[in-house]
Amino acid sequence: MRLLVAAAVVLLAAGCAGGDDDPVVRTSPSAAASAASAGPTGAADDPPGSVACTRLAVALSAGSLMVPGVVDGIVQSSRTADAPLADAADRLGIAYRAASAATGNADEPDKIAAVSAAGSDMSGVCADSGLRTAG
C-alpha cells in the first residue's frame, strides 16, 4: 500500500511539474486595456454607443431586460455614447431600478411595462443615431 501511495505522489508531482513546452501567454498592457473597453463581441465601441445598442438589441430579442445585470451592462456601455443615447440608457436604468424595487407589489406589472417602454424608446434612439438595433 505504501508503495502505491509513493508511486501516486511521484506521478502526480511529475504531471504537475509542467515543462518548457507549455505555452506561455503574455498580454501587453495596451492589449488588456483595449479588451476592457471592447464590447460583448470583442469589438471596440466605434462608433460610440454601438456596444450599448448591440447589447440592447440582444436583450430585446432575448426578452431579457429584467434579468439582473443586463440593463446595468447596457447603461454602463452607453457612457461613451452621445447625449440622446446616454439619456435614453439612463431612463432605462431608472425604469429597471423602479421595477426591481416594485417586486411583489401591486404596481410591479406597470413598472415592468415601463422597462419595456424605455427599452423600446432607446431602440428608437439607436435607430435615429444609425446604430444597430433589434431586427
Image (cartoon, rainbow, N blue to C red):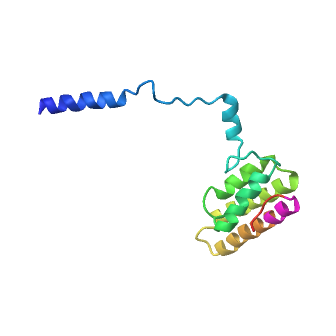
111 horizontally vs 87: left or right: left
Q: Nearer the viewer, residue 3 or 63?
A: 3
Q: In the picture shown, does residue 3 fall above or below 132?
A: above
- Give the residue at x 27% y 30%: 11
Q: Nearer the viewer, residue 54 or 96?
A: 54
The magenta stretch is: 123-130
The quarter of the picture where the C terminus appears is bottom right
8 horizontally vs 91: left or right: left
Q: In the picture shown, does residue 14 fall above or below 63?
A: above
Q: What is the total number of numbered labels drawn onto the structure image?
A: 0
- Give the residue at x 79% y 59%: 132
- Give the residue at x 70% y 57%: 55
Q: Main secondary structure of the magenta part?
A: helix
Q: Nearer the viewer, residue 67 or 127?
A: 127
Which residue is outermost to the front? 21
Residue 39: % across, % down: 70, 48
The quarter of the picture where the N terminus appears is top left
Q: In the picture shown, does residue 119 fall above or below 55?
A: below
- Give the residue at x 16% y 33%: 4
Is 127 colored magenta in this rendering? Answer: yes
Residue 38: % across, % down: 71, 44
Which residue is outermost to the left? 1
121 horizontally vs 98: left or right: right
Residue 44: % across, % down: 75, 45
Is 4 colored magenta in this rendering? Answer: no
Residue 14: % across, % down: 31, 27
